Amino acid sequence: MTLHFTRRQTLLTLGAAGAAFALGIPARAATRNLAVLNLASHAPSFIAFERGYFKEAGLDIEMKFFEAAQPMAVAIASGDAEFGVTAMSGGLISLAQKDAVKVVGGALIEEKGVAGAVILASNKAYEAGLTEPSKLAGKSFGITTAGSSFHFMAHKIAAANNIDLADIQLRPLQKLGAIVGALSTGQIDAWAIQANVANKMIREGAARKIGMVADYAPNYQVTTAFTSTKNARDERALTQSFIAAYSRAIDDYNAAFVDKTTDEAERNALAKLVHKYVEKDSPEDVARQNLVEGAMRINKGLALSLGSCVEQLEWFKSEGMVKDAITNEQLFDTSYVKTI
């Protein structure tokens, strides 16, 4: 079918595109997929989507759900998703070396004094003596995949307690739900996970708290924002618009749940919004409590803790999970956000 535009329609279309260009906002075009996990740490993704921040930035965003960090990086590299916010993984780093993806910002961070990832023991292991992280030698620890954030946290906990990581049995279970099930039934001894998930398990009697990750990895940049190298290099307006929209949602999230500077009505409204995606099997009031009590800081403006990320990169190299030749410049594009 051939479409015919009147002169007025053509001018209006060109005018809208011109205005978007002048404002640094990409003209609305193809749908962009945002890779996300059903975790409270992804709350800004849901807030920006539900409150229309992406649309106001000129982005037609759809959310694509995953259950681990590594496949998200693959989706960005393959074009199945445009943007993602998750932990640095060996797969992401290897794809960056192939000039396929770039880290352009930082998100979730461990900050002392703010709720962070909790180190858990199964009830069975706790009753057998696993009452603190220093007793992890010889015990099993759940991770999604080798090179995941859970793997790195196990490394930091082991190093701080003078435990050889080889003496901890890492159990890759691929999916978060599988780790929850394994810990709840005593099939694994320990795990470390964001406070809202941990608090839910503790409240339900499914696990016991034995420590906090922030005690072993302060200022750990848990998750990063990333996109394709093409977007970072050639689609600057697009990438800036995504960061601006996401940053608005971060401000909402931190104000309501971390700094608690908003009123109760705003906090309840955001908790209800996030509950559509997180802990959907829990009553709304319980999910709200877990969210409020377990909220971790997300960096304002997606600022990047570069020192923490470089430390992670060097650890990946030392473990032989990525090639030594990869450089900071191949992995990070620091031109978009503040580095801290």
Image (cartoon, rainbow, N blue to C red):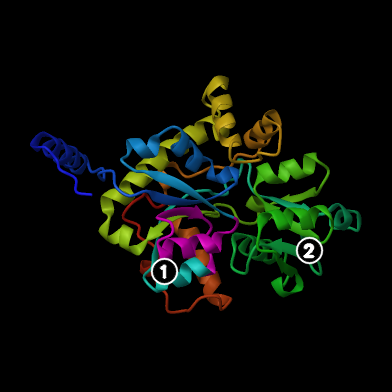
Q: Which amino acid does label 1 sit on?
A: Ala
> Left or right of 180: which side holds 100?
left
User: Which of the numbered marks, if any, corresponds to residue 136?
Assistant: 2
Say which residue label 1 marks: 96
Whether residue 103 is visible here, answered yes or no, is: no
Q: Nearer the viewer, residue 213 or 249?
A: 249
Task: Please tell me whether mark 1 sits on a helix, a strand or a loop.
Answer: helix
How many tags in the picture? 2
Which type of secondary structure does the marked residue at label 2 adopt? loop
Q: Which residue sits at x=73%, y=67%?
A: 171
Closer to us: 149 or 307: 149
What distance separates the C-alpha of mark 1 from that of mark 2? Answer: 33 Å
How many residues crowd mark 2 within 10 Å: few (<14), some (14–19), many (20+)? Answer: many
**First in sequence: mark 1 or mark 2?**
1
Tell me where residue 138 sits by quadrant. Answer: bottom right
Whether residue 68 appears in magenta in the rendering, the answer is: yes
Residue 257 counted in the magenta span:
no
Residue 82 locus on image (x, y percent): 40, 55
Residue 143 position, x and y percent, is: 68, 62
